[in-house]
Amino acid sequence: MEDPDNPSPEIQERWSKDPNNWIWGLIYYNREDKRLLPPKRNPSMGFTVNFANPKSVLFMIGFILFAVFIVSMIVRKH
């Protein structure tokens, strides 16, 4: 029996390659996948956010806020 919290690499790869888990081919949305940052369809292109996982969305928002904060601090110095 497969552990739903720790799926095998084969299942994770199948999820990434399944076109039903991609909205418009760009946005990854899979409720079964608990990973924060699953690989993109082409793994050599890096990672993406699983928009079906609320923790992933919070991570992305936090990262964007951090980037905006850093940019605003750099702009204030000039």
Image (tube, helix red, strand yellow):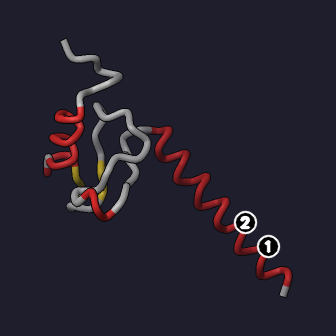
Task: Look at 77% across and 82% down and name the residue there.
Answer: 75
| Residue 54 x, y percent position in the rendering | 47, 39
Is 34 above or below relative to 13? above
Look at the numbered disc 2 and give the secondary structure of its residue.
helix
Label total for image: 2
Q: Which mark is residue 50?
A: none
Residue shown at 37% from the left, 55% from the top? 47
Of 28 and 36, which appears nearest the observer? 36
Circle 1 Cα neighbour tier, 10 Å, few/some/many (<14 / 14–19 / ≥20): few
Residue 45: x %, y % from top left? 31, 64
Kind of residue at badge 1 = Met
Q: Are marks 2 and 1 in contact (CB under 8 Å)?
A: yes
Residue 23, x across and y down, in percent: 24, 55
Are there few (<14), some (14-19), or many (20+) residues within 10 Å of tag 2? Answer: few
Q: CA distance from mark 2 to mark 1?
A: 6 Å
Task: Indicate the quadrant where residue 43 lies.
Answer: bottom left
Residue that sits furthest to the bottom in the current view: 78
Residue under numbered circle 1:
73
Q: Answer with left or right where residue 50 lies relative to residue 19.
A: right
Disc on res. 69:
2
Judged from the image, the secondary structure of the residue bearing numbered disc 1 is: helix
Residue at the limit of the structure toward the top, as seen here: 1
Tell me the quarter of the picture where residue 15 sits: top left
For image coordinates 48% across by 47% down, the residue present is 57
In the current view of this chain or complex, which residue is farthest to the right?
Answer: 77
Q: Quadrant of the N terminus?
A: top left
> In the rendered view, does 66 fall on the left or right side of 75?
left
- Name the side, left or right, on which 28 lies relative to 62: left
What residue do we see at 52% from left, 53% from top? 60
- 2 is higher (above) or lower (below) than 50: above
In the rendered structure, which amino acid carries the disc numbered 2? Phe
